[in-house]
């Protein structure tokens, strides 16, 4: 069986919930696929961040891809950028994507708008609100030369 690479283009999010005293957020996206985790860079002070990053995952058996799930989580980076102290990140929302929605090649990949789901009853994420926390991403296999981008782990 021929292996492949899954490419998830994380483009942007709109209208995320503010998490700082000044009414902004420092969001990043964390993707998990088959036990491997990748994340985007943190975008400072933005409720509508643009990442435009492609995160790559190896797929040993492409025939298993339709039964797989891609977990997409958005967090507010709570770390103090002037300190080495670690702080727990604040959850903004999550969406699960089916492997069956992955296009066989980049040219066939369609833009997917994904409203964020609430994590629990106690979460203060307002994902059910129209337009609140909508990451945009495209799923497919990478174009030539893209295999080295997006290897950033979490």
Image (cartoon, helix red, strand yellow):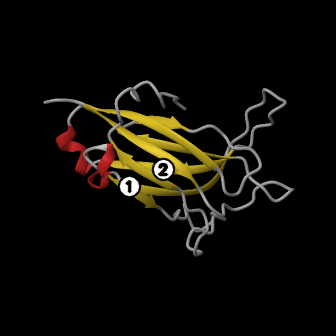
Do labels 2 and 1 touch, CB within 8 Å?
Answer: yes
Q: Residue furthest left?
A: 1
42 left or right of 143 in image = right
Q: What residue is shown at x 37% (from left), y 48% (from top)? A: 139
Q: Is residue 100 above or below residue 87?
A: below
Viewer-side residue, 51 vs 29: 51
Viewer-side residue, 10 vs 73: 10
The image quadrant of residue 148 is: top left
Q: Is residue 6 above or below residue 69?
A: above
68 left or right of 121 in image = left
| Quadrant holding the C terminus | top right
Where in the figure is residue 103, as x and y percent of width and height? 29, 50
Residue 97 shows which numbered tag? 1
Task: Provide the residue designation for mark 2.
Answer: 72
For label 1, the crowd category at 10 Å Cα-Cα, with few meaning under 14, some 14 to 19 and many 20 or more, is some
Local SS, label 2: strand
The image quadrant of residue 33 is: top left
């Amino acid at each position: 069986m021929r292996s492949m690479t899954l490419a998830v283009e994380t483009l942007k999010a709109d209208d995320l919930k503010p998490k700082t005293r000044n009414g902004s957020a420092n969001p990043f996206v964390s993707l998990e696929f088959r036990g491997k985790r990748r994340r985007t860079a943190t975008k400072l002070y933005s409720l509508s961040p643009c990442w435009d990053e492609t995160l790559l995952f190896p797929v040993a058996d492409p025939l298993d891809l339709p039964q797989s799930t891609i977990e997409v989580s958005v967090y507010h980076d709570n770390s103090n950028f002037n300190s080495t102290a670690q702080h727990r990140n604040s959850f903004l929302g999550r969406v699960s994507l089916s492997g069956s929605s992955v296009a066989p090649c980049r040219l066939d990949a369609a833009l997917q708008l994904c409203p964020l789901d609430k994590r629990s009853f106690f979460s203060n994420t307002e994902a059910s609100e129209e337009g609140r926390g909508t990451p945009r991403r495209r799923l497919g296999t990478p174009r030539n030369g893209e295999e080295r981008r997006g290897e950033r782990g979490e």
